[in-house]
Image (cartoon, helix red, strand yellow):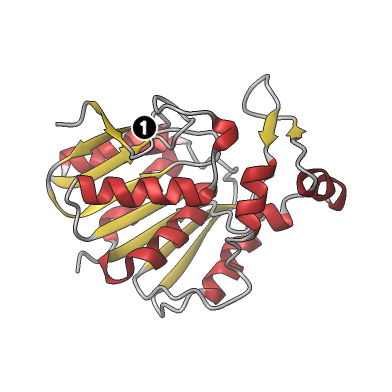
Amino acid sequence: MNDTQFHTMPDGRRIAFRYLTGEGPALVFLPGYMSDMAGSKAAATMDWAAANGRECLLLDYSGCGKSSGDFSDGTLSKWRDEILVLLDACSIGRATLIGSSMGGWLMLIVAEALGTRIAGMVGIASAPDFTDWGFSDEQKSVLATGGTVFEDSPYGPEPTPTYAVFWTDGEAQTILGREIAIDCPVRLLHGQEDADVPWGTSLRLAEKLRSPDVQVTLVKAGDHRLSRDEDIALLLRTIANLPKD
């Protein structure tokens, strides 16, 4: 059963998700900022899981996709808690997290919370700490005083907003300044034509992860989304080759 379902949080938020039973560890796809489970990489992950008998979970964070709520209220902490609640609601034991862009930051925060329940991780243009390195001093000043920053988006006609509540919470969740206490196998994919997240971020992340089993794959002609056919094929190969223990 992988039709869209809804889980109601204690405060009434309805979180949209798709869940597929199968062999574990469960594949859990975490979308990027202002993205949702309808994206091509999430859909390809679910299709691959279905074809290979794997357990899989996709979700929309509150304020995104089919979930209720306002995007302006979203934070990493709130979305992390939604992920953790859904894992338990679906009775998922061990999980392999797949995080795209901001989802790559959430992936790390969720993994530290779950400890030994994490079997592996795949980051796609992972963007940990982007509230720190992704904004100018002027923009940070606006956000620190409760304002909203709008930036032109290459992915649509509307500008991309960053709200003060998200930025403040993100600054409290920065992770690259310390050892990241994660010991599972980690695979990091990053395009060298990424105009949003410098590919050196994945190299820095690899250094900070405590796990000895970390591999970084750079895609020379890859952009931020890594959603070309060949990029998605690389993602699926990477998932397939992760250890299952």
Q: Amino acid at mark 1?
A: Gly
The residue drawn where x is 41% and y is 77% is: 211
Residue 119 higher or lower than 235, as above or below: below
Location of the N terminus (image quadrant): top left
Across and down, in percent, residue 20 comes to 18, 39
Residue 228 higher or lower than 88, as above or below: above
Q: Does residue 101 show up?
A: no
Residue 17 higher or lower than 242, as above or below: above
Q: Nearer the viewer, residue 114 or 133?
A: 114
Q: Nearer the viewer, residue 81 or 180?
A: 81
The residue drawn where x is 53% and y is 78% is: 179
Location of the C terminus (image quadrant): bottom left
Which residue is tagged 1?
12
- Mark 1 crowd level (few <14, some 14–19, many ≥20, 10 Å Cα): few
Q: Nearer the viewer, residue 96 or 142?
A: 142
- 219 displayed left or right of 245: right
Q: Mark 1 falls on what kind of element?
A: loop
Across and down, in percent, residue 212 comes to 41, 80
- 13 displayed left or right of 177: left
Q: Does residue 232 show up?
A: yes
